Amino acid sequence: MALARCRECGKPQGRTNEYVASAEPLGYFLTAAVCGATGCERPALIWLTAREKAAFDAGERVFGLSTQAIKVRVTTLVLD
């Protein structure tokens, strides 16, 4: 599963996955994707495994993220 980390926190050192490439999320640098590292709130890159990198190379642009891998910045409250 992909992970979100900013440039400063860098490539994640996963226990179960090896991350081989990163991709900019839609709207990067002004993105809602926030680094998933504890205490960090910088814009995130999306780090991909080898399988996800192959999917990216084949045209895939939507990737699932594991639990607590990302935080999301919001702007406006929407009331029903």
Image (cartoon, helix red, strand yellow):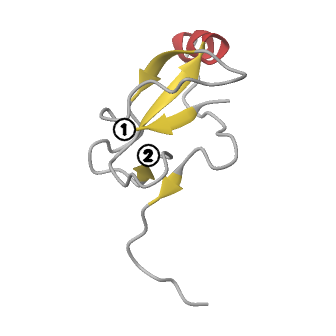
Residue at the (62%, 33%) spot, across then down = 63
- Does residue 66 lie above or below 75 as drawn? above
Please name the residue that numbered disc 2 is placed on: 35
Residue at the (51%, 55%) spot, across then down = 71
Q: Position of residue 5 (x, y in %)?
A: 44, 37
Residue at the (55%, 90%) spot, across then down = 79
Spatial CA distance of label 2 from label 1 is 5 Å
Left or right: 1 in relation to 13: right
Q: Position of residue 43 (x, y in %)?
A: 34, 46
Task: Residue type at mark 1: give it.
Answer: Cys
Quadrant of the snapshot with the N terminus: top right
Q: Residue furthest bottom?
A: 80
- Does residue 21 lie above or below 25 as drawn? above
Residue nearest the viewer, comparing 77 with 5: 5
Q: Earlier in the sequence, mark 2 or mark 1?
A: 1
Checking the image for residue 72, the label placed there is none
Q: Are marks 2 and 1 in contact (CB under 8 Å)?
A: yes
Task: Residue type at mark 2: give it.
Answer: Cys
Quadrant of the snapshot with the C terminus: bottom right
Q: Position of residue 18 (x, y in %)?
A: 61, 15
Left or right: 76 in relation to 4: left
Please name the residue that numbered disc 1 is placed on: 6
- Count residues near mark 1 (Cα–Cα under 10 Å), then give few for <14, some for 14-19, many for 20+: many
Q: Position of residue 36 (x, y in %)?
A: 50, 46
Mark 1, secondary structure of its residue: loop
Residue nearest the viewer, comparing 52 with 59: 52
Mark 2, secondary structure of its residue: loop
Residue at the (66%, 37%) spot, across then down = 64
